[in-house]
């Protein structure tokens, strides 16, 4: 009976985690903390600050004590080389050889007589074809996984974005733009929720 009662409470959402995302509507200031990652994390932080500022949703502050929310997370901009190697080949080799011989000779009272027979056969076939390729492709990829945390330490919003670059933006700038756009889209959904379909 206790298990059934707990199942009912879970299905009714009694133990469900509170949805803290509506706090995004009451926020005025955000502080973007240092991001963990490689050497490029500091550059990505600056790009994220610039992109968030561009949304005009919040005041971006450099003073963490004045912030309503703190953005934390990790980011990295990677440049690496992918190597693709392929090889195809067809080789067929064959050979056959046959040889036989016979020889008879003799002398009787100064008169010579002899018999000699030789035979030889040989077959040899060879086909060969081989193709190989070695391709080095330079890749550029950036990612950021960030979260907004309130003063109680609760995460009220999070996103992970990655990019290999856009038409007019590098990978890092594109990731920063995606983070800001995702936040703006989520805030817009909170401000104008869709009414449930009847």
Image (cartoon, rainbow, N blue to C red):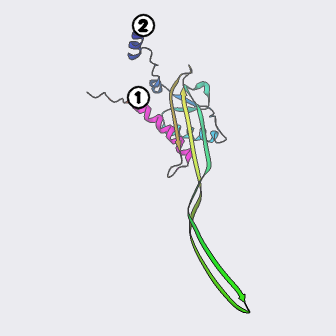
Q: Which residues are magenta?
A: 168-190
Q: Quadrant of the C terminus?
A: top left
Secondary structure at badge 1 equals helix
Residues at circles 1 and 2 in contact by the CB criterion of under 8 Å: no
The image position of residue 15, as x and y in percent, is 45, 15
> Of marks 1 and 2, which one's residue comes earlier in the chain?
2
Tag 2, which secondary structure? Answer: helix
Q: Residue at x 42, y 7 (%)?
A: 2
Q: Residues within 10 Å of mark 2 (few under 14, many from 20)?
A: few
Question: From what the image shows, is residue 156 above or below residue 180?
Answer: above
- Seen at 60% across and 78% down, the residue is 120
Asked if residue 175 lies in the magenta stretch, the reply is yes
Residue at the front extreme, as displayed:
109
Q: Is residue 147 magenta?
A: no
Q: Mark 1 — residue?
A: 190
State whether the magenta stretch is mostly helix, strand or loop.
helix
In this rendering, which labeled residue sits more in front, label 1 or label 2? 2
Tell me residue 72's x, y (percent). Answer: 58, 30
**What label does residue 2 carry, if any?**
2
Disc 1/disc 2 C-alpha distance (Å): 37 Å
Q: Residues within 10 Å of mark 1 (few under 14, many from 20)?
A: some
Q: Nearer the viewer, residue 162 or 124?
A: 124
> Foreground residue, 139 or 113?
113
Residue at the right extreme of this rendering: 110
């Amino acid at each position: 009976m206790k298990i059934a009662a707990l199942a009912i409470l879970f299905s009714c959402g009694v133990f469900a985690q509170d949805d803290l995302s509506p706090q995004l509507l009451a926020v005025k200031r955000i502080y973007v903390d240092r991001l963990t990652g490689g050497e490029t994390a500091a550059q990505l932080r600056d790009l994220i600050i610039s992109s968030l500022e561009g949304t005009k949703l919040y005041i971006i502050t450099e003073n963490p004590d004045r912030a309503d929310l703190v953005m934390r997370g990790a980011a990295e901009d990677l440049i690496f080389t992918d190597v693709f190697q392929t090889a195809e080949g067809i080789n067929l080799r064959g050979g056959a050889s046959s040889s036989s011989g016979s020889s008879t000779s003799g002398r009787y009272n100064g008169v010579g007589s002899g018999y000699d027979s030789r035979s030889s056969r040989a077959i040899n076939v060879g086909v060969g074809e081989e193709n190989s390729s070695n391709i080095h492709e330079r890749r550029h990829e950036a990612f950021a996984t960030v979260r907004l945390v309130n003063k109680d330490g609760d995460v009220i919003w999070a996103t992970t974005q990655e990019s290999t670059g856009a038409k007019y933006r590098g990978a890092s700038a594109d990731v920063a733009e995606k983070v800001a756009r995702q936040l703006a889209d989520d805030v817009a959904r909170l401000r104008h929720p869709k009414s449930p379909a009847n």
